[in-house]
Amino acid sequence: LSPLECSPCAAEKFIQCEGLRMIFRALLGKGAARPPKLDSNSTKFVQNSSKKIQRVKRTSDEARAIEEYILGLIASLCFYAAESEARHEAPKRLLAKLSEPDKLPRLFDLLQNSRDSIEYERRQNLHLSELASYARDLRAGGHALRLAATIITFAAVHSPKCRQLITSQHLDFLPHVLSNYADDLLDFGPDEENEDRKEKDHMAREEATRRATFLKNWAAAIAGLSNHAATSLDV
C-alpha cells in the first residue's frame, strides 16, 4: 500500500499542499523529469552544443510504469474523496481538477491506448491459459485501463460537469471493467504462512474490500448513466 492508501491524513495533507497540481501536471507529461544521460566512459553528464543536458529517452515500458503509478495515486485520492468522512475540500478540489479542459481528454487517451495495447497483445498471443492471459493483459496495460476507468467513473458519478462529457464518449465497457476490478480485489488472499505479514495483509484486505464496494457501486451508477444517455439519444 502506498502512503496515500494507508492514511487518510496523508491524502488530505497531499491535497492541502498543492499535490493535485503536481500530480496532474505529471499526468499530462509535464512534471516527471527524466534522469540525465551519462557518458559511457565517465560519470559526467553528456552535453550538446547548446550546453543543455541531454535526457535519456524512456522506453515504452518505463513510460507505462510511470503512467500507472500516477493513475494509481489519483485513483487512491478518488477513493479517499468518496469516503463519507472525507473533508468537503478534498472532493471539491479533486473534482475541480478533473473538470479542467485537458484532464478528462488525457484520461480518455490513456484508456483507449490501454485497450488498443491489450487487443494487440491478444492477437499476438493466442492459446494461452487463463492465468497467462490475465498476466498478458495486465502487462499490456490492463492495470492502467482499470485505474483510468476508476477515475473517469468517479468524475461521472460525482460531477455533473464531468458527467456530460463522459456520457457523450459512449464508454459502455466501463461497468464491465470496474466489476472485474472489484472481483479481483475481493479475491485478495492473505499469506497464512507468514506471521509477520498477517497484520499488513489484514489492512490490505480491508482496503481491498472497501475499494471493491466503491467500484461495484460506481459500476452500477455509470451503467445507469449510460442507459439514460442512450435513451435520451433515441428520443
Image (cartoon, rainbow, N blue to C red):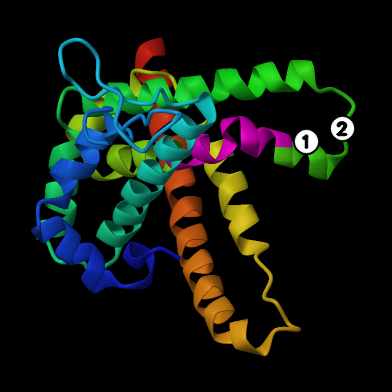
Q: Give neighbour class at mark 1: few <14, some 14-19, many 20+ (Cα, 10 Å).
A: some
Q: Quadrant of residue 36?
A: top left
Q: Identify which amino acid the numbered label 1 is placed on.
A: Ser
Residue at x-position 48% and y-position 33%: 62
Please say whether residue 235 is visible from this viewpoint. Answer: no
Q: Which mark is residue 128?
A: 2
Q: Seen from this angle, which residue lies furthest bottom?
A: 195
* 103 to the left or right of 130: left
Name the side, left or right, on which 234 lies relative to 35.
right
Q: Tell me the tag on residue 81.
A: none
Count of numbered circles on the image = 2
Which is more toward the observer, 11 or 186?
11
124 is higher (above) or lower (below) than 86: above
- Please, what secondary structure does the residue beneath circle 1 have? helix
Specify the quadrant of the image occupied by residue 81.
Answer: bottom left
Q: Position of residue 138 (x, y in %)?
A: 63, 38
* Above/below status of 176 relative to 186: above
Residue 64 is situated, as x and y percent measured from the top left of the image, at 48, 32
Q: Residue at x 16, y 18 (%)?
A: 51
The span from disc 2 to disc 1 (Cα, nearest Å) is: 6 Å
Label 1 near label 2: C-beta < 8 Å? Answer: yes
| Whole-percent x, y for residue 56 in the image | 38, 26
Residue drawn at (83%, 41%) of the image: 130
Q: Which mark is residue 133?
A: 1
Label 2 neighbour load within 10 Å: few <14, some 14-19, many 20+: few
Q: Which residues are magenta?
A: 136-147
Is 212 colored magenta in this rendering?
no
Q: Quadrant of residue 222?
A: top left
The amino acid pointed to by label 2 is Leu
Foreground residue, 45 or 81? 45
Q: Nearer the viewer, residue 101 or 37?
A: 37
Pinpoint residue 210: horizontal percent, then vertical percent.
Answer: 46, 67
